[in-house]
């Protein structure tokens, strides 16, 4: 694949004839999963494509505090993976008006009931860090996907993007550096070391 249009054409061809087609778009933090998902949705059929965020299944911050995991938010064990699995099952069953959460990065919370996936939706693009993880409850999600795609970005570029992300959200350079070193990069390394193979690999330019 040499372009996003080529990638969209490939997904469209793979999905031909399916009542509903579910694509996993996986990659480490900072890889550009949300950007790629929405760009693909725009190139496919926007009226028949939905983007589902695994980040919508983040544990709430108050719960993470009670669990002693607030400083590791985003690690594999800080998500309601069972809830995501159930929702994916409902999506695959083509239930009408499946309601899903959406993660608001600015507020740092998941907003329940923010997305409705109706029966008219043909393609569902699911984006998340751990969709290809080979450990824990994440490993059981594989059968929920018709096609898997991994975004491949050099680790140094991921680090640069993650620092920039927190700067853009108003964090001080010191706070951004501490969070990336203590939380984001360990999550990056988990994804890189523990993810299984994907059907497709997408390698965007460093500026994407």
Image (spheres, rainbow, N blue to C red):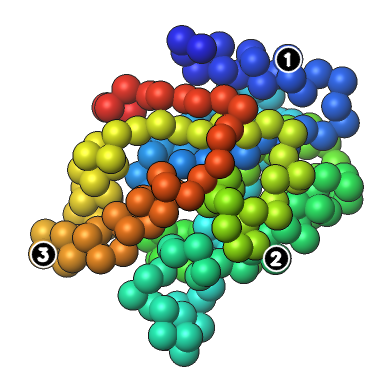
Answer yes or no: do the residues labelled 2 and 1 have beta carbons within 8 Å? Answer: no
What is the quadrant of residue 135 in the picture?
Answer: bottom right
Label 2 residue SS: helix
C-alpha gap between disc 3 and disc 1: 47 Å
Label 1 residue SS: helix
| Point 27% across, 27% down: residue | 207
Disc on res. 28: none
Q: Position of residue 127 (x, y in %)?
A: 56, 44
Tell me if residue 156 comes above or below residue 43 in the rendering: below
Q: Nearer the viewer, residue 19 or 146?
A: 146
| Point 62% across, 39% down: residue | 24
| Crowding near the residue tagged with mark 2, few <14, some 14–19, many ≥20 C-alpha atoms within 10 Å | few
Q: Position of residue 189 (x, y in %)?
A: 35, 51
| Point 85% across, 27% down: residue | 18
| Crowding near the residue tagged with mark 1, few <14, some 14–19, many ≥20 C-alpha atoms within 10 Å | few
Q: Which residue is mark 2?
A: 83
C-alpha gap between disc 3 and disc 2: 35 Å
Q: Position of residue 81 (x, y in %)?
A: 64, 63
Tell me which label, 2 or 1, sits earlier in the chain.
1
Answer yes or no: do the residues labelled 3 and 2 have beta carbons within 8 Å? Answer: no
| Point 87% across, 31% down: residue | 19
Q: Is residue 198 left or right of residue 173?
A: right
Q: Position of residue 144 (x, y in %)?
A: 75, 45
Q: Is residue 11 left or right of residue 170?
A: right
Tell me which label, 3 or 1, sits earlier in the chain.
1
Q: Which residue is mark 3?
A: 174
C-alpha gap between disc 2 and disc 1: 30 Å
Q: Which residue is mark 1?
A: 13
- Image quadrant holding the C terminus, namely top left
| Crowding near the residue tagged with mark 3, few <14, some 14–19, many ≥20 C-alpha atoms within 10 Å | few
**Residue 42 visible in the displayed image:** no
**Residue 208 visible in the displayed image:** yes
């Amino acid at each position: 694949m040499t372009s996003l249009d080529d990638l969209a054409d490939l997904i469209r061809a793979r999905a031909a004839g399916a009542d509903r087609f579910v694509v996993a778009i996986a990659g480490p933090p900072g890889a550009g999963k949300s950007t790629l998902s929405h760009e693909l949705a725009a190139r496919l059929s926007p009226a028949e494509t939905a983007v589902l965020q695994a980040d919508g299944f983040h544990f709430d911050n108050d719960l993470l505090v009670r669990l002693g995991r607030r400083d590791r938010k985003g690690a594999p064990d800080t998500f309601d993976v069972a809830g995501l699995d159930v929702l994916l099952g409902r999506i695959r069953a083509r239930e009408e008006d499946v309601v899903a959460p959406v993660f608001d990065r600015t507020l740092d919370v998941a907003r329940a009931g923010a997305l409705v996936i109706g029966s008219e939706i043909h393609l569902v693009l699911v984006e998340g860090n751990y969709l290809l993880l080979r450990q824990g409850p994440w490993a059981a999600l594989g059968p929920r996907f018709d096609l898997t795609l991994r975004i491949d970005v050099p680790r140094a570029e991921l680090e640069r993007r993650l620092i920039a992300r927190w700067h853009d959200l108003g964090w001080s350079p010191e706070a951004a550096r501490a969070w990336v070193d203590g939380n984001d990069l360990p999550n990056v390394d988990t994804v890189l070391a523990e993810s299984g193979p994907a059907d497709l690999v997408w390698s965007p330019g460093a500026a994407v």
